[in-house]
Each structure stands twice: as C-alpha cells, then as structure tokens.
C-alpha cells in the first residue's frame, strides 16, 4: 500500500477513540508496522536511486556522454543485486556497448 493512500491523521483519530486497552494496543502495533514498512520502502528507494546514480556516474567517468535512453534503462531497474552487478560491469567493461548488452 502506498503512503499517499493512507490518511494517517484519520487513523490516529480512530486509535485515540478506541476504548479497549487491548484493541488500542493492537491498533498502535499495526500503525507501527505500517510506519516501519513505509520507512523500509523509503530506504530501499534511496538505495536504488543511489546505485542508479553510481552506475551512470561510473559510465560517465569511463566513457563520457551516456545516452539518455541508457540512463532511463538503468533508472528503471528496481533490483538491488542487478544494480550492484551493473556497477561492477560499468567499472570493468571495455566499452559502453558491452555495458548496454548486460541490461
């Protein structure tokens, strides 16, 4: 579920209105779980963005201009392990065509 879909203020108001201590604790635990999931999702997005930037920067340092289409392909990858592998490839490949073949 995306954070944009969650009305956190409404959830907080509902939790405050709960009278049963057990139910209130369960609701708070669920809210904490949602916050944790959101935090983890944000951290993953940050790591992916950083890896994409690193791959593109390595290509720019090695080969100069990197075609925008190639940059878009790299930015579309949401697999952390694949981006790590592509960073190594960007550092070690003979030319940008060899890199592109790895995508």
Image: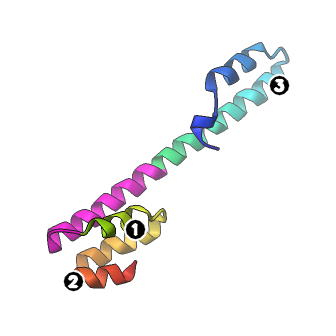
Instruction: Identify the magenta region.
Output: 44-66
Q: What is the tally of numbered marks visible in this picture? A: 3
Q: What element carries label 1?
A: helix
Q: Mark 2 points at which residue?
A: 95
Residue 20 in the image: state x and y as whole percent.
85, 18
Q: What element carries label 3?
A: helix
Frontmost residue, 64 versus 47: 64
As measured in the structure, the alpha-carbon distance from the residue carrying label 3 to the one carrying label 1 is: 43 Å
Q: Residues within 10 Å of mark 1 (few under 14, many from 20)?
A: many
Q: Which mark is drawn over residue 23?
A: 3
Q: Quadrant of residue 35?
A: top right
Q: In this view, does 46 lie to the left or right of 39?
A: left
Please give the name of the residue rendered at 64% of the width and 33% of the height, measured from the top-left corner: 6
* First in residue order: circle 1 vs circle 2: 1
Q: Nearer the viewer, mark 2 or mark 3?
A: 2
Q: In which quarter of the image is the N terminus?
A: top right
Magenta includes 48?
yes
Task: Specify the principal SS of the magenta part.
Answer: helix
Q: Residue sitting at 15 percent across and 68 percent down?
A: 61
State whether residue 35 appears in this view.
Answer: no
Q: Which of 61 and 35 is in front in this view?
A: 61
Density class for disc 2 (Cα within 10 Å; few <14, some 14-19, many ≥20) is few
The answer to whether residue 51 is above or below residue 44 is below
Q: Does the magenta segment cover residue 38?
A: no
Where residue 92 sits, quadrant-wise, is: bottom left
70 w.r.t. 93: above or below: above
**Residue for badge 1:** 83
Nearest to the eye among marks 1 and 2: give it.
2
What is the x, y in percent for residue 55?
30, 66
């Amino acid at each position: 579920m995306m954070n944009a879909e969650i009305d956190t203020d409404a959830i907080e108001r509902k939790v405050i209105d709960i009278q049963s201590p057990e139910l209130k604790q369960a609701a708070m635990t669920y809210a904490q779980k949602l916050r944790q999931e959101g935090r983890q999702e944000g951290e993953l997005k940050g790591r992916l963005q950083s890896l994409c930037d690193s791959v593109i920067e390595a290509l720019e340092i090695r080969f100069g201009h990197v075609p925008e289409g190639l940059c878009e392909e790299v930015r579309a990858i949401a697999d952390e392990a694949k981006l790590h592998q592509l960073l190594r490839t960007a550092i070690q490949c003979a030319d940008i065509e060899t890199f592109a073949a790895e995508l």
